[in-house]
Image (tube, rainbow, N blue to C red):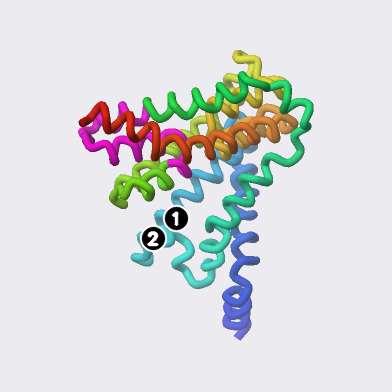
């Protein structure tokens, strides 16, 4: 009876359960990285990896398409991981940045954002071509995914890309996010990533908000709002350029 009653309550308050579940996963991830790596790998990177593995298991074991949200008791994860909370989290990362420090980035910050989008797109496009993709839509979608896992599906939807191509673009963005998150603390000392201005330039070049935020949190938490600010701009610029100017450039080259 107690188990049944608990199940009813958990199903009724699915979103609360989702927050608790994710909180436990994050706590265990940070505990594991502190215990086994001495903090050299950021807990966020471990949490993302575990989340991807759990999402795969949920889809595989239930035959569904929503990962862990296909389990009735964890249905709230589908809401928590939806577009509304995602966009709120992205915007929230920018709060805490000082206006004076933002102005210091000036033109170089804007150049970093545009250059970051274009370079990531080109690298992703080259990888797509090397794997045999030849149509402009597929190349552009995968190239956009190399920018971020948000720009990829936005571009794919705008261009009418097939679902498997959009999935590849998301995968490319996730790999980039994890690499940035794990690699940032390792290279911070070599690239002078120790002040708000360099954090904004770094966020503009890398672009992946989650990766930049996690990496900077492991480097210096005070730098997170600055890197996240330009990384958020990067996402917006990518969503504008990838399905328009960059796609037209790819189509002109591929014919």
Q: Is residue 183 above or below residue 63?
A: above
* Residue 47 pos. (x, y %): 56, 45
Residue drawn at (65%, 15%) of the image: 192
Instruction: Label 2: state its secondary structure.
Output: helix
Question: Which corner quadrant of the image does residue 185 belong to?
Answer: top right
Residue under pointer 1: 55
Q: Is residue 6 left or right of residue 119?
A: right
Residue drawn at (40%, 54%) of the image: 56
Residue extending farthest to the bottom is 1
Q: Is residue 29 left or right of residue 246?
A: right
Instruction: Label 1: state its secondary structure.
Output: helix
Q: Is residue 75 above or below residue 219?
A: below
Q: Is residue 134 magenta?
A: yes
Q: Is residue 31 visible?
A: yes
Q: Within 10 Å of the Cα at label 1, are there few (<14), some (14-19), or many (20+) other Cα atoms?
A: some
Residue drawn at (60%, 73%) of the image: 10
Question: Which corner quadrant of the image does residue 248 belong to?
Answer: top left
Q: Within 10 Å of the Cα at label 2, are there few (<14), some (14-19), or many (20+) other Cα atoms?
A: some
Question: Which corner quadrant of the image does residue 133 belong to?
Answer: top left
Which quadrant: the N terminus? Answer: bottom right
Q: Is residue 20 left or right of residue 162?
A: right
* Residue 119 pos. (x, y %): 43, 24
Q: Which residues are magenta?
A: 123-151
Q: Are marks 1 and 2 in contact (CB under 8 Å)?
A: yes
Dominant secondary-structure state across the stretch colored magenta: helix
Number of on-image labels: 2
Residue drawn at (59%, 29%) of the image: 203
Q: Which mark is residue 59?
A: 2
């Amino acid at each position: 009876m107690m188990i049944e009653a608990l199940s009813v309550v958990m199903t009724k308050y699915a979103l609360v359960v989702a927050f608790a579940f994710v909180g436990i996963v994050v706590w265990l991830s940070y505990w594991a990285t502190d215990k086994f790596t001495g903090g050299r790998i950021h807990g966020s990177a471990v949490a993302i990896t575990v989340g991807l593995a759990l999402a795969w298991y949920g889809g595989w074991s239930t035959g569904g398409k929503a990962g862990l949200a296909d389990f009735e008791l964890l249905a709230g994860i589908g809401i928590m991981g939806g577009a509304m909370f995602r966009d709120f989290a992205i915007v929230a990362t920018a709060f805490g940045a000082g206006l004076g420090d933002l102005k210091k980035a000036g033109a170089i910050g804007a150049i970093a954002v545009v250059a970051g989008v274009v370079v990531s797109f080109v690298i992703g496009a080259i990888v797509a071509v090397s794997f045999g993709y030849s149509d402009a839509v597929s190349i552009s979608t995968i190239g956009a995914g190399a920018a971020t896992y948000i720009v990829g599906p936005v571009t794919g939807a705008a261009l009418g890309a097939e679902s498997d191509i959009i999935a590849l673009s998301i995968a490319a963005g996730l790999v980039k996010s994890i690499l940035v998150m794990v690699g940032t603390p390792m290279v911070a000392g070599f690239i002078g990533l120790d002040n708000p201005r360099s954090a904004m330039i770094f966020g503009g070049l890398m672009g992946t908000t989650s990766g930049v935020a996690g990496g900077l949190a492991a480097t210096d938490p005070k730098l997170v709002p600055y890197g996240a600010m330009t990384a958020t701009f990067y996402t917006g610029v990518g969503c504008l350029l990838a399905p328009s100017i960059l796609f037209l450039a790819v189509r002109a080259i591929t014919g």
